[in-house]
Image (tube, rainbow, N blue to C red):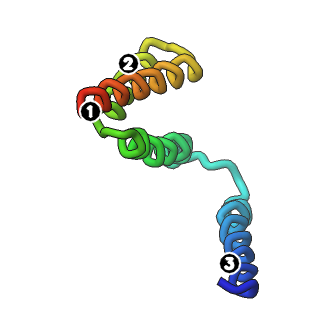
Amino acid sequence: MDKHSIIICILLAIVTTNMIRVVPMLLIKRQIENRFLRSFLYYVPYVTLAVMTFPSMIQTTMSPISGTVALIVGLIAAWRRMGLFPVAAICCAIVYLMDNIILSVVN
């Protein structure tokens, strides 16, 4: 890519990300009172994060089995109201241990 194309891509990214934030503020002047729309907008960030996180948890490990087991154990730990750091540490430990076990069995 030449320098001109990179600058155009950067400017296009700036315009796109800012339009996503500016257009709703210009179009909606008052508070949203529709319960369905409010609840939908409340959960959009959580759904977006889940859609990006869950597939990568399974696909980025050495085997999908270790990612799936870590995901299930992480969900159980979160369900039991453990904090973000302990859940992340447990999931990382499970993936590390299971990948080492699977690697030692294969070799």
Q: Nearer the viewer, residue 38 or 13?
A: 13
Contact, CB < 8 Å: mark 2 with mark 1? no
**In the shown orientation, is residue 20 left or right of residue 98?**
right
* Other-residue count near label 1 (Cα within 10 Å), few / some / many at <14 / 14–19 / ≥20: few
> Residue at (40%, 28%) from the top-left corner?
95
Q: CA distance from mark 3 to mark 2?
A: 43 Å
Mark seen at residue 76: 2
Q: Earlier in the sequence, mark 3 or mark 2?
A: 3
Q: Residues within 10 Å of mark 3 (few under 14, many from 20)?
A: few
Residue assigned mark 1: 107
Q: SS class of the residue under badge 1?
A: loop
Where disc 2 sits, the SS reads helix
The quadrant where residue 15 appears? bottom right
In space, the residues marked 3 and 1 are separated at their CA atoms by 46 Å
Farthest residue, direction front: 107
> In the image, what residue type sits under mark 3?
Cys
Q: Is residue 101 left or right of residue 26?
A: left
Distance between the alpha carbons at the discs numbered 2 and 1:
31 Å
Three-letter amino acid code at the position of disc 2: Ile
The residue that disc 3 covers is: 9
The image quarter containing residue 27 is bottom right
Q: Is residue 37 left or right of residue 105?
A: right
